[in-house]
Image (cartoon, rainbow, N blue to C red):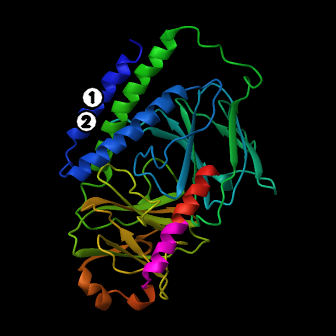
Amino acid sequence: MVTKPFADAVAEAEEIIKGAPHVRTEQDLAEGYDYLAGSIRASLQMAWAYERDFPFFVTSTGPHTKLGLDNPDTLYFHAYLRDDAEYVVTGTRGSTADLSFQVLGGDYTPAESPDSVTAFDDRDLDIAVDGSYEVRFGPEPSRGRSNYVTLGAGSAMLVVREAYSDWSTERSGRIRIHRADTLGSSPEPTSSTRLTAKRYEVAGKMLVNRLKTFLAFPEWHYLHLPVNIMTEPRPTPGGLTTQYSSVGHFELDDDQVMVITVPAAPKEDAPYQGFQLGSMWYISLDYINHQTSLTADQARVDPDGMIRYVVSERDPGLANWIERTGHRRGYLQIRWQRLARELGAGDGPQVEVLGLDELPQRLPYHERQRVTAEEWAGRIAQRQQDVAARMLG
């Protein structure tokens, strides 16, 4: 039976979900099954997109295929590579805050992250006045050639990220990839069920590996930290040289709030700065219908130059409310991207846990942060419209 390996993998994956150490409530399990559905879809897509001779970009993660504390502000694309072939990436740079490229050697596993062979953003490229560009990835030394990136040994995947700081005004560009020596030719048609069976087998392995990996990943980077704190800014793990992050995990009662105070980074230092919550499945919360994330452009900045995020279950009536959506536990992350300088402790967050009833007296600029129910509904409506437009971009 051609599909049996995949069916077996789905059954194994369901047991992984049911046995996850953080599952305590019916909500935890229901979200786990939703996460499983997205992982099934993504694994099938990746197995059928595994084409290194006639490559194309596919969406790595999205609202229904979440993975690895996916950033609500980012579109992710990937294509597969050989380290002994040359590939041509052409496109037009949009108005997104950050456009970055990363070549990975291999994939994530439950034991380790893949090596980052190279990583850079569009500042390293020569881009025409109209925003168009062409960059080549190949095995030869660059020898100073503009827009040529040498593929190191083991290069296996090209990942492209477009980050949005202002969802309403920034727009994505266009991007394409082809192998230099196969353009104009065609792959051999599938002539037997053996290749299809192999793909189902690979998809099953991807599915199980994906779940095991990203249940282990927070143990490496988050859960060893004390609860309800955030780290100083540090280079984001994985070799993204122009990105920093601050991370943590929270555990709060419904009558508690967490106030996270962080300087709003100047645009010349960090065109992108964003904060988000994640569930214990290590994926983003619903960022379309709830304000579970905010960029510096979306947040209301106080007169002292600080952003004060208020993480709580109950509505505090404030512009920078970050909704927990029923999650007593979860992950916290701030990202800074396309950095022009290194960040230090003074650029990072301060965290305080308060009672909800303490906010009016304890939160600076409390009155300035207040919003009406109608204003809040408008903020949510804008998110819904912006994501719908972005997904069609």
The residue carrying pointer 1 sits among few (fewer than 14), some (14 to 19) or many (20 or more) residues within 10 Å by Cα, namely some
The residue beneath circle 1 is: 12
In the rendered structure, the answer to whether residue 172 lies left or right of residue 77 reads right
Residue 145 is drawn in which quadrant? top right
Q: Is residue 274 above or below residue 55?
A: below
Along the viewing direction, whichever of 257 and 180 lies nearer the viewer: 257
Look at 29% across and 52% down and name the residue there. 280
In the rendered structure, the answer to whether residue 109 lies left or right of residue 177 reads left
Residue 54 is drawn in which quadrant? top right
The residue beneath circle 2 is: 16
User: Dominant secondary structure of the magenta stretch?
Assistant: helix
Query: What residue occupies the far right of the structure in this picture?
Result: 129
Quarter containing the N terminus: top left
- The answer to whether the residues at label 1 and label 2 have Cβ atoms under 8 Å apart is yes
Residue 109 drawn in magenta: no
Counting from the top left corner in percent of width and height, residue 272 is at: 55, 65
* Residue 342 showing in the rendered view: no
Look at 40% across and 52% down and name the residue there. 69
Label 1: state its secondary structure: helix
What is the span of residues highlighted in magenta in the rendered image? 370-382
Identity, as a three-letter code, of the amino acid under mark 1 = Glu
* Residue 22 showing in the rendered view: yes
Distance between mark 1 and mark 2 Cα atoms:
6 Å
Counting from the top left corner in percent of width and height, residue 229 is at: 28, 68
Identity, as a three-letter code, of the amino acid under mark 2 = Ile
Look at 66% across and 54% down and name the residue there. 172
Q: Which mark is residue 259?
A: none
Counting from the top left corner in percent of width and height, residue 338 is at: 58, 60
Q: Is residue 186 above or below residue 123?
A: above
Query: What residue occupies the far top of the structure in this picture?
Result: 192
